[in-house]
Amino acid sequence: MSVRSDVIEQFKIVAAEQDKRLAPLVDDLPLLECGLDSLCFAVIVARLEDTLGVDPFSTAVAQDAEFPVTLREFINLYEKASK
């Protein structure tokens, strides 16, 4: 699986588990409008760390990057950290 597909899959799984209505996952979707709350994002970040072996929010990548605002930026952050 690609990083992108791993991220999208986790969004869908966590939304279903937390009984959240997920907005269509398009690149320019603002994260604040995706339908998930902060607990959901914490679960996603933890699971992606297990799956991908990186946490871009606690690495040097995060120091050089702005906090992601859109789904595309969130995915890009993980793609950069996975390299």
Image (cartoon, grey):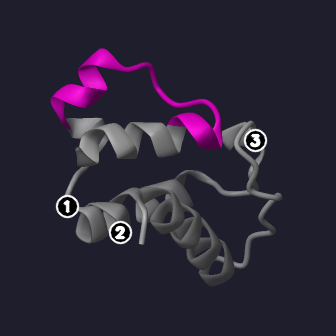
Quadrant of the rendered image containing residue 35: bottom right
SS label for mark 2:
helix
* Label 2 environment density (alpha carbons within 10 Å; few <14, some 14–19, many ≥20): some
**Circle 3 sits in a helix, a strand or a loop, which is it?**
loop
Q: Which residue, as the protein is rendered here, is positioned at the far bottom? A: 17
Residue drawn 55% across the image and 72% down it: 9
Q: Is residue 16 left or right of residue 60?
A: right
Gap in angstroms between the C-alphas marked 3 and 1: 25 Å
Q: Verify whether residue 6 appears in magenta.
A: no
Disc 2/disc 1 C-alpha distance (Å): 9 Å
Number of marks: 3
Residue at left 25%, top 20%?
A: 63
Residue 50 percent location from the top left of the image: 25, 69
Quadrant of residue 69 in the image? top right
Q: In this orientation, which residue lies closer to the viewer: 67 or 8?
A: 8
Q: Are marks 2 and 1 in contact (CB under 8 Å)?
A: no
Task: Give the residue displayed 60% in from the left and 39% down from the top.
Answer: 72
In the rendered view of the protein, which quadrant contains the N terminus? bottom left
Location of mark 3 (residue): 29
Range of magenta residues: 59-73
Q: Mark 1 points at which residue?
A: 53
From the image, tell me which residue sits under label 2. 47
Kindly identify the residue that appears in the image at 25 percent across and 29 percent down: 61
Vertical order, 67 against 56 (above or below): above
Q: Which of marks 2 and 1 is nearer the N terminus?
A: 2
User: Which amino acid, mark 3?
Assistant: Leu
